Amino acid sequence: MNLTLRDFSVLTVSFAVLQFLASTWVKSRIESSVKHEYDGMLDLLRRQRDIRVSYLIDAFRVLAKRANLPEGEHPELAAPIESALVDIQLFGTPKQIEAAKRFAQAEAQKKRISMDDVLNAFRSELRAELSLPPIEGPIWTLRYGNKGASSIIT
């Protein structure tokens, strides 16, 4: 078998084309694999964030409801408050957990404390997490009496 210069050139060009196609295919597969893995991790992080924020919003609502109630026993809030405090310990930031702990200690000692620090910490961090602008000032609530809207409590 005698290879001519032309045959050798054709083989060389064919080999170069095959090598180029193989390297392009491998590069494409690697890029696709990395993108798939990145997208999966990003999706997982988004789902975790959504769950975390949802639980913290619910906890915020429970604590805000308790914060603006008049003095006295409120047994209907016992279970929701207990659940909110557990959720905060699971999903909250260290600042939120510490604020919730102060609230729990005051409640356990039947002391009334201002919930402004706790609620403002939650509001600020949750708004930042949701890319909302910060808001200053106290949390306020509209309370209804027996005859309709009666007062705004801060």
Image (tube, rainbow, N blue to C red):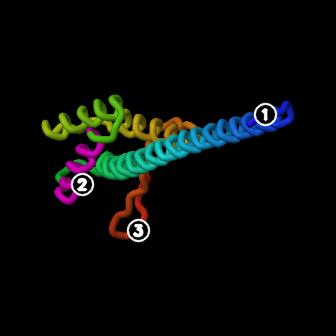
Q: Where does the magenta region start and end?
A: 75-89
- Which residue matches tag 1? 3
Which image quarter holds the C terminus?
top left
Circle on res. 89? none
**Would you call the spot at circle 1 few (<14 residues within 10 Å), some (14-19), or many (20 or more)?**
few
**Would you call the spot at circle 3 few (<14 residues within 10 Å), some (14-19), or many (20 or more)?**
few
Residue sitting at 72 percent across and 36 percent down? 15
Residue sitting at 28 percent across and 30 percent down? 98
- Which residue matches tag 3? 148
As drawn, 62 above or below 28? below
Residue type highlighted by circle 1: Leu
Residue 8 appears at what percent x and percent y?
79, 32
Residue 30 appears at what percent x and percent y?
57, 39
Pick the front one: 30 or 129: 30
Verify whether residue 149 appears in magenta: no
> Residue placed farthest to the left in the image?
109
Q: Quadrant of residue 148?
A: bottom left
Residue type highlighted by circle 2: Pro
Residue type highlighted by circle 3: Gly
Verify whether residue 87 appears in magenta: yes
Pick the front one: 34 or 23: 23
